[in-house]
Image (cartoon, rainbow, N blue to C red):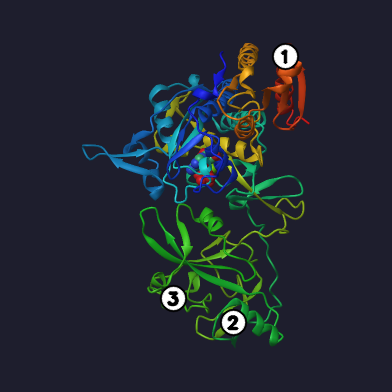
Amino acid sequence: MRPAHFSSLFARTMRDDPTDENVASAKLLVRGGYVRKMAPGVFAWLPLGLKVLKNVEKVIREEMAGIGAQEVHLPALLPKSVYSPTGRWDEYGDNIFKLKDRHGADYLLAPTHEEPFTLLAKDLLSSYKELPLTLYQIQTKYRDEARPRAGLIRGREFIMKDAYSFSLDEEGMKECYVEEREAYERVFRRLGVSYVVVRAFSGPMGGSESEEFLCPLEIGEDTFVQAPSGRAWNVEALKTPAKEEDFSSLPLPREIQTPLDGSISSLEAFLKEKGISSPLLKNIAVSLKAPDGKKTLAVVGLPGDRQLDLKRLEACLAPLEASIAEEADLKAHPELVKGFIGVTKVGPQSSQDAKCPYFLDAHVARGSAWCTGSDKEGFHTLGLVYGRDFECDKVVEAAQIKEGDLSPDGSGELSIERGVEIGQVFQLGLKYSRSMGFKVTGASRGPKDVWMGSYGIGVSRLIACIAESHRDEKGLVWPISAAPFKVHVISARKECREECERLGRETCRLGLETLIDDRDESAGVKFADADLLGSPIIAIVGREYMERGAIEIKVRESGEVRKAPSQEAAKEILAYAEALRSALLQGACLE
Ligand code: ATP
Ligand code: MG
């Protein structure tokens, strides 16, 4: 290994933030010359960025090897026929990049690889003796995300580690799942990334059990809830405990005249003025879009004091996409009177020809009484009991979760946090092997089903999360395992160049990748760039060296500076590096 030189490094640092990035990590990765945006959600990796990527991949590869997973590499470009048997060619809708070849045949750029891995395994494996098996790849994925954002966090071209396990029975699948999950924990710990494991919603992937690894960050798009017991859930996976109430003594419903504007707030004020106390049931018309683009209308009922959470609703209705119905969507259903939508013209109690389905949020307990619209302007009905006066087509999770809601595990009140999903593990069961006809011969009695799992880590997103959680006002502060260079040597005076070269050669000899800032820049510019780039150890060769033969060694994370005689400096740096490494493994920071 030889030291690298800043003067010839293909990177240009920037003093000012790029205008088109809005999160700190993305700004710093661009300013530090790590990556460069080429199109929305599409990035070029520059030498520094690529070094970080290789370091992160190395940790992942070591942990995958540790559980006996074998690496392969599949194409990103695949024909429609691969994704048709499972229905995902259509299900992914606008989220995949589809293209045609010169003969007019349909292709896609793979958003994930369950199908081709299943086909490949089916192609090569025939006997139960060859299972269990886990394969993985680190490869580029494509998703035409509606909102690429936050630099590498939500890209349209991004790098994923995806692994797939094949087992002979459910128990075998679970064993592979646990192994993979444990490997994830080691990967994230080694890279200094904090994570929370949350119970997840399987989404279009299908299957039963699934967990997500979320990095707790304010900029995250995922909301998760945490119970006092420490258990956590993605809000999309949170199930409201079912409740039933005794309605035997409740009076029959009665209609009342109410203000014409039909808003919840004016209705609340009106009932208060009249001295009527009743929980309100708001019925919201939503438009549901199927993967083929076909739209239908449905009505969702939820407690008046909660907001509608479309992501939670979508998780119950997948693969349909939900949005609040607009005037145009409502035209076909004149029976739905805006502001006064009730329960008589929807769902099972509707006598309409084209019935509008009625979904009821799980917070509405069976047997409880509500005030809701009467399906005519200016009227509401009081005392409508769910299960006595109306029914629904499906109970859904549609209401926003609130801080202080009770945890489903009974351990107390939930707190709400934000995070970025860095990985997800799925027990897929038989979904893919069945639909693609993958079985192996058993020890006896005919072919056996293959139980699968799939496991993803967003490698490029993970790098953004490392950057986002390891930085300060001056720049990046890489954990040593991910850092592109472990040592950044600053030649603060022209006369010190030779000593810098000597030190760099020595740190390299000790196994520490080293960058020497040999540019004709002022010491101030070099110090600022070293802080921006974020190597964990910065060695300054300048006045101290010229006057006393000493090198200043700065630990980027703590800012601590120590002096060492030039001949001892490399050894001292190595000791720091080792301390940083072991602090990382213990999940702690070096003080
Ligand atoms: P999200 O909910 O954030 O869109 P996802 O659940 O659709 O992600 P998976 O299909 O579970 O993603 O993919 C596995 C991993 O790939 C995710 O845990 C995430 O870390 C990463 N990933 C997914 N989409 C992107 C993206 N657009 N850019 C970067 N990384 C991504
Ligand atoms: Mg996911």
Ligand 1 lies under 8 Å from the Cβ of mark 1: no
Viewer-nearest of discs 1 and 2: 1
Viewer-nearest of discs 2 and 3: 2
In the rendering, which numbered label is found on residue 381? Answer: 2
Q: Is label 1 in contact with label 2 (beta carbons under 8 Å)?
A: no
Viewer-nearest of discs 1 and 3: 1
In the rendering, which numbered label is found on residue 271? Answer: none
Q: Residues within 10 Å of mark 3 (few under 14, many from 20)?
A: few
Identity of the residue drawn at 70% across and 21% down: 577
* Separation of marks 1 and 2 at Cα, in angstroms: 86 Å
Residue 397 sits above or below residue 95 on the image: below
Secondary structure under the numbered disc 1 in the rendered image? helix
Q: Which residue is mark 1?
A: 566
Ligand 1 lies under 8 Å from the Cβ of mark 2: no
Q: Amino acid at mark 1?
A: Ser
Q: Which residue is mark 3?
A: 351
The answer to whether residue 546 is left or right of residue 142 is right
Position of the N terminus, as image quadrant, is top right
Secondary structure under the numbered disc 3 in the rendered image? loop
**Residue 476 on image: x %, y %:** 63, 36
Q: Please tell me which of labels 2 and 3 falls first in the chain.
A: 3
